[in-house]
Amino acid sequence: MLCGWMGTAAQMPAQTTRSGEQGSLRLMIGGGGSDFNSAWQSRLQGPTVWVDWALPLKGLGIEAQGTGLYGEVSNYNLRQGCALMGGIYRWEHYRNIRPYTKFLGGIGNLEVAQPNASYSLRDKGTVYEPGGGIEVRLWRKVWVRGDFSYQFWSGTLANDALTPNGVTLGVMYDFRHTRPR
């Protein structure tokens, strides 16, 4: 009977985390500049910030992103802001390069105003943003990110025809423990 217990115990999987991964935050925080082509034949620029939380499943995560874009369209000032959240998948096969794809959704604010007018036109709508890009390790836990996104706005003044797209270039800090290979 004792041999049976010993054989069972030897086959039981460990219930501990590797010492190199204990206490590791699964958080990545970054920010950068975005340049988008608006739906009105003009360019919009502004800051973008994001926070990623890596799920225990390899490569999968959740991303929250905020973007504020500003520009001018034929004598009007245009502002677009988005607060989005969704899923992200990273191919972490390579040591210093991580391609990724994402799909985010959330709310967008749109404001159109004449430069010296006392009024502006404002609206809110739902925004869906598929995208992807690449992250390249710059130094230890610091990564450079290049991102392309295509947005679909609905429920806004633009009668569901607002589809800005553009690129974001930024820097990100990865709080996760990175194991040497």
Image (cartoon, grey):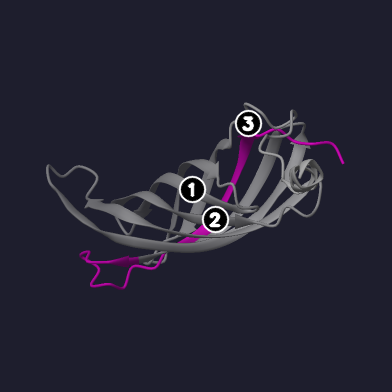
Q: Which amino acid does the dot numbered 2 rest on?
A: Ile
Seen from the viewer's position, the closer of residues 48 and 50 is: 50
Q: Residue flagged by tag 3: what amino acid is it?
A: Phe
Cα distance in 3D space between marks 1 and 3: 15 Å
For this orientation, the residue located farthest to the front is 1
Could you say where residue 40 lies in the image, as x and y percent from the top left?
36, 66
Name the residue: 62% across, 37% down: 172
- Mark 2 closeness class: few <14, some 14–19, many ≥20 residues within 10 Å: many
Q: Is residue 30 left or right of residue 58?
A: left
Label disc, if present, on residue 111 of the rendered structure: none
Name the secondary structure under disc 1: strand
Determine contact: label 2, label 1, CB under 8 Å: yes
Q: Name the amino acid, label 1.
A: Glu
Instruction: Decide whether residue 164 is among the magenta residues.
Output: yes
Is residue 26 inside the magenta stretch? no
- Which secondary structure, mark 3? loop
Horizontal side of 165 relative to 21 (left or right) equals left
Q: Mark 3 points at which residue?
A: 175
Q: At 31% from the left edge and 73% from the top edge, which residue is drawn?
A: 161
**Location of residue 124 with respect to 41 vertically, above or below:** above
* Residue under numbered circle 1: 63
- Look at mark 2 in the image and give the residue it sits on: 88
Residue 148, given in percent of the width and then of the height, sits at 57, 59
Which numbered disc, 2 or 3, marks the residue that appears first in the sequence?
2
Q: In which quarter of the image is the C terminus?
A: top right
Image position, residue 68 (x, y; %): 39, 44
Whether residue 56 is visible to the viewer of this picture, yes or no, is yes
| 106 horizontally vs 94: left or right | left
Which quadrant, please, contains the N terminus?
top right
- Structural crowding at the residue carrying mark 3, measured as other residues with C-alpha within 10 Å and reported as few (<14), some (14–19) or many (≥20): some
Residue at 49%, 56% (x, y): give it.
87
Tell me where the magenta segment starts and ends, as one range: 153-181
